[in-house]
Image (cartoon, grey):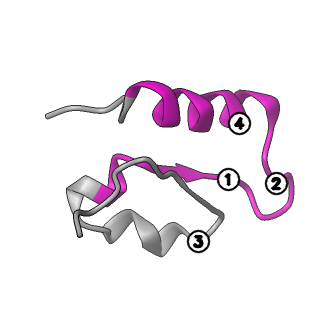
């Protein structure tokens, strides 16, 4: 069974910035006090539709 790449990680935990690159590229950092904004939701949706936005 293969690994499904259709996912996004949404969290306010800054320590998740240390995730491996394949996962970090699918990480959307939110604010603990504000939560998920429309703009960040759009980023998450874009990741699900087209893949990670960041590249190195």
Q: Which of 13 and 10 lies nearest the eye of the viewer?
A: 10
Nearer the N terminus, badge 4 or badge 3? 3
Report which residue position mark 2 lands on: 35
Residue 17 in the figure: left or right of residue 1 = right
**Crowding near the residue tagged with mark 4, few <14, some 14–19, many ≥20 C-alpha atoms within 10 Å:** some
Report which residue position mark 1 lands on: 30
**Residue numbers of the magenta segment:** 23-50
Give the residue drawn at x 65%, y 64%. 12
Residue 30 in the figure: left or right of residue 1 = right
Q: Residue 20 appears at what percent x and percent y?
A: 23, 65
Tag 1 and tag 2, C-beta contact below 8 Å: yes
Q: Distance between the residues labelled 2 and 3?
A: 11 Å
Nearer the N terminus, badge 2 or badge 3? 3
Q: How far apart are marks 4 and 2 (CA)?
A: 10 Å
Q: Is residue 38 magenta?
A: yes
Give the residue drawn at x 34%, y 57%. 4
Report which residue position mark 4 lands on: 41
Tag 4 and tag 3, C-beta contact below 8 Å: no
Tag 4 and tag 2, C-beta contact below 8 Å: no
Nearer the N terminus, badge 3 or badge 1? 3
Name the element at disc 3. Answer: loop
Q: Which of 7 and 27 lies nearest the eye of the viewer?
A: 7
Q: Quadrant of residue 32?
A: bottom right
| For discs 4 and 1, the disc positioned in front in the rendered view | 4
Residue 22 in the figure: left or right of residue 11 = left
Q: Residue lying farthest left? A: 56
Whether 36 is drawn above or below 48: the answer is: below
Report which residue position mark 3 lands on: 13
Give the residue drawn at x 67%, y 36%. 40
Q: Residue 36 appears at what percent x and percent y?
A: 78, 47
| For discs 4 and 3, the disc positioned in front in the rendered view | 4
């Amino acid at each position: 069974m293969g690994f499904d790449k259709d996912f996004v990680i949404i969290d306010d935990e800054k320590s998740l910035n240390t995730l491996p690159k394949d996962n970090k590229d699918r990480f959307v950092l939110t604010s603990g006090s504000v939560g998920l904004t429309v703009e960040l939701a759009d980023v998450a949706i874009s990741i699900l539709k087209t893949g990670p936005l960041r590249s190195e």
